[in-house]
Amino acid sequence: MRVLITGGTGNLAEFVIAEMQRDYELVLFDRVRPGENRFPFDIRHPYHHGDLTVGEDCARAVAGCQAVLHLGAIPWATDVPRIIERLRSEGRPIPSPDETMRVNTMGTYHVLREAHAGGAQVVVTVTSNCVLGHCMGRPSGRPMQIEYLPIDEEHPTDVEESYGVSKQFQEQLMAGFTRMTAMRTYGIRPAALYRPERQKEWAENYKPAEEWTLSRPFNGYLDVGDAARALRLCLEAGIAGDLPPHDNYYIASADTLEAEPTLEVLSRLRPDLLASVPEGALPGRAAFFSSRKATKAFGWQAESSWTRYLGAAQQASN
C-alpha cells in the first residue's frame, strides 16, 4: 500500500517513517525541503515539495496513494503574542497572525479533497489534545472548566485560541468528508510530543511543579515513537474496517511529567479537583488524559516514560 505522509520532513515524520517503511510504500510531502528541517534525518523516500494550501500541490503528492497520514500543520498559535516573542527570540521568521488558521484548516481541506479525488481509502490526521481548550493561553482570561478527571473524549471542550480552534476545524472537516464520501477519517489527539532527547533533558533538570498550570502538570506529554505507533495502528484498523467511519482519539503517555503520584499532585496543587476523580481512576502517576478509547479501538498503549532517564540523571549528578 502506498501512503502519503504530509509534513513529511517534520519532527513526528521521522518516527512515523521508521515505524512504517518496512511494510508500506511511503511518499513524503512538505514545504520544508529535506536538509532544511529543524531535526534533519536521512530521507530515502519520494519527496514532493509543495504547500498544503495549494490544491494542485496536494493532488500531485497524493496521486496513487491509498491512504494519508496528515501530519503537516502549524504547531502553535500565530496570533498569540508570547508565541511571536518566542519565535523572534529564536531568530525565526515571524508569520502572519492568520497563518495557523489558514494552514491548518485550508491545508486539511485540500488534503481531504484531493485524497478523495485520488481514491484514498483512509486519512488519519494529527489534531491535538488542545481541542480541549487548555493550550497556548486563554485570551479571555477566563479559566478553563475541568468537569472531571481523567479527561476523555466525552469531556466538553472550551477552546479559545486559534491553534485549538484550527484543530477542532480539522476534525469537523474530516467528519464532513466522511459523511459525504466513502472515505474513512480519524483524528489522533496527542499530548505534547517529546523526543527522547527532550525526555532526557527533563529528567536531568527535573523539579516538582510548584503551581498548577494547564501546560504543567495538566497537559502531560507523549513519547514521539509512541505517537508514531498510534498512527500506524489507527490507520491499519481503519483500513480493516474495525473502526467507525470517523472518530477521534486522545493519546498520551500513561504517566505525567511529575515524579510524585498524581493524586498527591492534585492534593498539593488543585485539591478542589479531587472530588471529580472517581475512585481508582488515577492510580500511581497516571496521566490526566485518558487513552482508554484508543486502547479499546485499536490496541494502542503508551510504552515509554521519561522516567527511564531519571536514574541515569540522578547518578550523573552524584
Image (cartoon, rainbow, N blue to C red):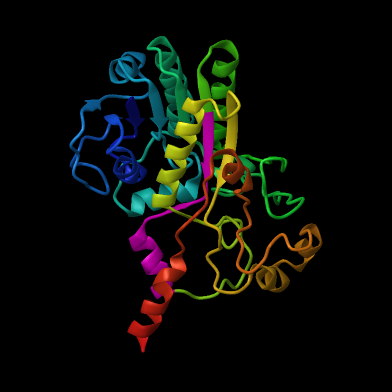
Q: Quadrant of the N terminus?
A: top left
From the viewer's perspective, is 61 left or right of 86?
Answer: left
* Residue furthest bottom as drawn: 318
Q: Position of residue 218 (x, y in %)?
A: 61, 58
Against 83, residue 211 (above or below) is below
Q: Which residue shows up at 54% across the image and 73% down it?
A: 259
Relative to 189, say whether 178 is above or below: above
Residue at 27% of width from left, 38% of height from top?
Answer: 22
The quadrant in which residue 304 appears is bottom left
Q: Nearer the viewer, residue 53 or 249?
A: 249
Specify whether residue 35 is in view.
Answer: yes
The boundaries of the magenta stretch are 186-205
Magenta stretch: residue 204 in it? yes
Q: What x and y, as percent, mark residue 293?
A: 63, 43
Residue at position x 57%, y 71% in the image? 209
Give the camera-side residue of 306 and 219: 306
Counting from the top left corner in percent of width and height, residue 54 is at 35, 18
Q: Residue at the location (58% across, 26% down)?
A: 246
In the image, residue 217 sits, relative to residue 146, either above or below, namely below
Asked if the stretch drawn in magenta spans residue 20, the answer is no
How many badges with numbers are in the image?
0
Q: Give x and y (percent) for residue 127.
A: 51, 37
The C terminus lies in which quarter of the figure? bottom left
In the rendered structure, the answer to whether residue 276 lies left or right of residue 131 reads right
In the rendered image of this protein, does residue 44 appear above or below residue 92?
Answer: above
